[in-house]
Amino acid sequence: VEYREVCRDYRIRQYRTEECGNLYAYVIERCFDALRPNARIGMIVQLPIVCTDRMITLQNECLSQTSNIWFATFDDRPARLFDGLEHIRATVFTGKKGAQDTRHVFATSYNRWYSETRDVLFNTLCFADISDYLMRGAIPKIGQEQGKRVRDRLSHFKSVRMSLAGALRGVRIYFHNAPQYWIRAMDFAPYFWNERAGEQLSTQVKTVSLSSTVDAAVLVAALNSSLFYWWFIILSDCRHLNMREIETFPLGLAEMPDQMKHRLSELTRRLSADLKRHKNRKECQYKTTGRVVYDEFYPKHSKSIIDQIDEMLATHYGFTDEELDFIINYDIKYRMGRNGGGEGI
């Protein structure tokens, strides 16, 4: 429940988490205040507690009040924790109140499952100690040692933020801000038309600019990679691709050899052509805008090209064969399965 929906009925006072704007943040803060040292707390709340800037003060509250804390995160597709309720992506956390100088933070991967495996879901949860991987606004959803090793490899490279250019003087690329199983980044503006305004850029398509055509093509390749999909999943709300995830991605453009940049640029050219080849132009009707015509893309059919991009990036980062295999096959069951096919622009 959003605080703004009830603040006319009652007000909170002197809560450290007030800026979070959701009542569950205040409930958690109050529970921590009520706990004795070494007492336990457990909550089932919404996913954003671990992955949005809005919840930073609540994240700080959880981390500063506990000596040990565990976060398990769950998607609402293809199956969800609570059948019969609306789709809610959930975090289950348990903690032990104690001194922060001995704190350990544990997390699972982002769990997806089919309904037939519900009975064994909690028995098969796997936690990893991610105390050294916390980021501002994110308690990373890294539940495996292999994921921690990949994160260690990336830490040696500079972020994309260091290579971005102003929109007026840079080369623009386009990305859809609401991915689910695939990131869709392109060096062309995807077709979108509505009856009210004509042909234009979809409101769900955002842009970012780089200083050169080659660097722009490299970023397109990287954003479409399974590596960046993994990065998006561990840090984001797993529904919205924000500039935070792009800007903090350790691509290391300045350290990348020109030969590798040109090979990734060629893979971007091939991927763009393949996406266009498999696209489907669709129409629908909305009350506000009338008829809408747009292109729907299917990155699933371009997985072989995306794998080649990941192989190039693995060379760049110095991944082992096992680390590359982990990335290429990350969440593969759901990305390539019956729910991971079409992604509309």
Image (tube, helix red, strand yellow):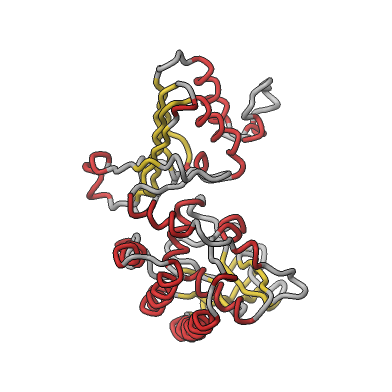
Q: Is residue 77 left or right of residue 197?
A: left
Q: Is residue 327 left or right of residue 220?
A: left
Q: Nearer the viewer, residue 201 or 252?
A: 252
Q: Nearer the viewer, residue 308 or 193?
A: 308
Residue 288, horizontal then vertical, whole percent: 67, 63
Q: Within the image, what quadrant is residue 188 found in?
A: bottom right
Q: Is residue 289 left or right of residue 111?
A: right
Q: Is residue 185 above or below residue 153?
A: below
- Could you tell me if residue 345 is visible in this image? yes
Q: Quadrant of the C terminus?
A: bottom right
Q: Quadrant of the N terminus?
A: top right
Q: Is residue 127 above or below residue 175?
A: above
Residue 113, horizontal then vertical, whole percent: 30, 51
Q: Nearer the viewer, residue 75 or 222?
A: 222
Residue 108, horizontal then vertical, whole percent: 36, 44
Q: Nearer the viewer, residue 212 or 200?
A: 212
Residue 192, horizontal then vertical, whole percent: 61, 76
- Could you tell me if residue 10 is visible in this image? no
**Numbered disc total:** 0
